[in-house]
Amino acid sequence: MSQFAEYAICLLLLTGGAFTLIGAIGLVRLPDFYTRLHGPTKATTLGVGAIILSSVIYFSSRDGGIGISEILVTVFLFMTAPVSANIMAKAAMHIGVRTVENTEGKPWDQ
Amino acid sequence: MFDRLSFPQPWLSLILFVIWQFLSDGVSGGSVVLGLILAWGIPQMTQAFWPERPTFFKSWRMPAYLLRVLFDIVVASFQVAKLILSPRKPRPMFVSYPLELEQPLAITILASTISLTPGTVSVDVSDDNKLLLVHALDAENSDEVIETIRTRYEKPLLEMFE
């Protein structure tokens, strides 16, 4: 494996790990349910994306060729993350989850 | 009767078949048979969720849109990460976004985009498909949120689905 590939893999793994960690910290630190939704749908998506990219580089520099299945995993992830966020937000609105005081505007009445 | 044997969404079937070949280790007799079963079965099961046939849209504009969204996801992740780590309290806000798009597929794409990009998650669509409820993590005022979504995402989608 080339030196360059090793550096790229390290960098991507560290970035991915950092973003996943920050997403998890966000779950603890953010004040209410709706704001907590933002952590996993964004920071973690990029985190997993970076880890998968490093896996693509690792296997393509070892065996040659591009790992299509990893790219498909990324595509599925990016397609499903908004759907789960949307359904959770909808469910929260339905049962009237408490929002933090400084929230402007209101969810709709159901 | 013959509906049961047909492919209601040929493009979806084709995509499912090709994806299944990539997911299994190399094309073989088994993967082709299972791919065909999935390409037939999944559209049959999901057909009820798409009462209207997917309309034609300018799919060649899609790659440029996807690149923009991908770039925004990276930017969004840095913004959200910064906000999580800073001691400042976020200023969350619910915004009712007036939709100009009309097709369900276009609205689905817009809602998904909103959920993946800077500081916004889409919560619900009104029954008449006119309003989209958006939750912004950290926003100054609602006009700004609406303006960003309008110019960055809805305009290109409108051009695509016209």
Image: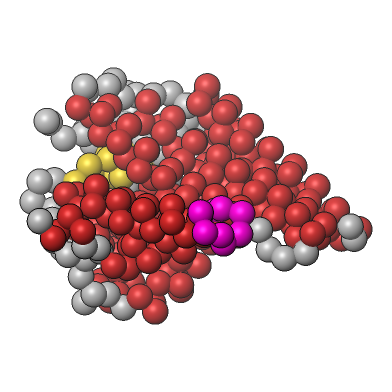
- Residue range in magenta is B23-30
Screen quadrant of the N terminus of chain B:
bottom left
Furthest residue to the front? B29
Percent x, y of residue A57: 74, 57
Q: Residue at x 52, y 22 (%)?
A: A28
Q: Residue at x 65, y 49 (%)?
A: A52
Above or below, B54 against B90 in this view is below
Q: Is residue B28 magenta?
A: yes
Percent x, y of residue A24: 57, 28
> Foreground residue, B84 or A68?
A68
Above or below, A55 against A108 in this view is below
Residue B98 in view here: no
Screen quadrant of the C terminus of chain B:
bottom left
**Is A51 on the left or on the right of B91, as rendered?**
right
Above or below, B146 against B86 in this view is below
> Foreground residue, A91 or B120?
A91
**Is B116 on the left or on the right of A66, as rendered?**
left
Q: Is residue B77 magenta?
A: no
> Foreground residue, B26 or A63?
B26
Q: Residue at x 66, y 58 (%)?
A: A67
Q: Which quadrant of the structure image shows residue A92?
A: top left
Q: Residue at x 89, y 57 (%)?
A: A1
The dominant secondary structure in magenta is: loop
Percent x, y of residue B147: 31, 60
Percent x, y of residue A96: 22, 22
